[in-house]
Amino acid sequence: MSKRPPGELEGQQGKVPRLDGVNGLPQGQVTDVKPLPRELPTLQYKEGRLAKDFIFHWKSNKPSLLVVISPEQMVGSNKQVKSRQLWGEDIYTDDSDLVAVLLHLGYYASNNTASNPLVARFYAQVTLLPPQEQYTSCFRNAVRSRSWFSKIEGCSYKVERCWLVTRSSKQLELQPRVDDCAITHPTFALSNSDRQMNTRSTTGSSRNKPLTEVTVLYNLCNEPWMKYSMSSIADRGLKSSQWTSSRLREECLYLETSRLRFELSYAGTATTDDGQVDNYTFARCKRVLPVSAVRALGVPLPPAEAELLEDNLTWDDIQWANMSMTVRGKQYKMLRMHFMTRCKGN
């Protein structure tokens, strides 16, 4: 497999503590682990050294493996975890670190540099799979995986089960949290609630106002867009003219995931039992175009350039969260956003 550059660390590096039960063990009933369907080849976890073993067993037609992990290695200070040595979302590359994968899937998490003294060892059952066409990045449980879009040599793998054994020989099956997403927030947030920062030269000066921190990311066309966040999407005040819904009457909102772009636009009003309500449409952009090309086609985009996903949306059909938005029950994990003034195409 090709050697990947280490790259820059992104996202939050802290791990959410999961050992919050009695005596430091995870919450839940302590029961015997379900027996394995058959005797499996067993490997001992070593940092950065499982890839060769995975490839060997894959070529030997042994797709199911059992990996034993010591508690000293199942910590957030593991070098492979700190450097985010994992590629994929649910299926990972063969050189993805298993401890980082388990934290990413939510089986276990720890923000301590020391291991838990009550745990004797961890077990993980993995299934080896053929190489995938691509491996997408995903932020879960305070760990962000990396993406990889080239063909790899070797194999892939996914985690089937994970459990731990305590010093007293009790076993506890661990459950993943693969859908650990931010809770839905109200759409109102005052603009002065943004985090503020001062430079050293202005910290002690009352005449200078603090600067509001703004995060800018590059979109799929390598243009600067705002990072998707609640402070950027929320209402700006209590007056109706400062609401985001009012802003959408004159502008369209474009949002991007790691690979797709979406358009949220105002579609007029409709009469209901509660009176007049605003309607919106949510569409996927068929092509990822630069801002100048979008303006030339018109904002919102014509039907030939946008695939309609949802129409006749009310404001209550749209829910906003820190890292995602939900449209009629379907969740989209957003990274970037950009408002564009409505205009007609050339």
Image: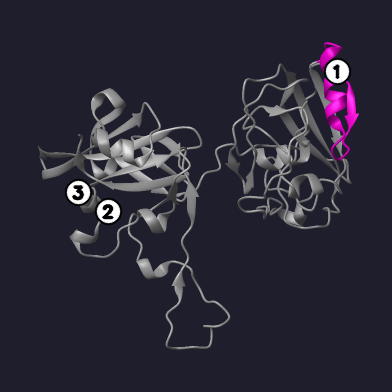
Precedes in sequence: disc 3 or disc 1: 1
Task: Where is residue 292? Give x, y as percent.
Answer: 32, 40
Outermost residue on the top side: it is 61
> Crowding at label 1, few (<14), some or many (≥20) Cα neighbours within 10 Å?
some
* Element marked by disc 2: helix
Q: Which kind of residue does numbered mark 3 sit on?
A: Glu
The residue to which callout 2 is attached is 244
| Res. 254 visible in picture | yes
Between 105 and 80, the one lying in front of the other is 80
Rendered residue at 36%/47% (across/down): 338
- The vertical placement of 140 against 14, above or below, is above
Task: Where is residue 254? Give x, y as percent.
Answer: 35, 41
Give the mark toward the camera: 3 or 2: 3
Precedes in sequence: disc 1 or disc 2: 1
Precedes in sequence: disc 3 or disc 2: 2
Left or right for 83, reference 271: right
* Element marked by disc 1: helix
- The answer to whether marks 3 and 2 mark residues whose Cβ atoms lie closer than 8 Å is no
Q: Which kind of residue does numbered mark 1 sit on?
A: His
Magenta stretch in the rendered image: 38-62
State the image quarter where residue 144 is shown.
Answer: top right
The residue to which callout 1 is attached is 57
The residue to which callout 3 is attached is 250
Q: Which kind of residue does numbered mark 2 sit on?
A: Thr
> What quarter of the picture does the C terminus occupy?
top left
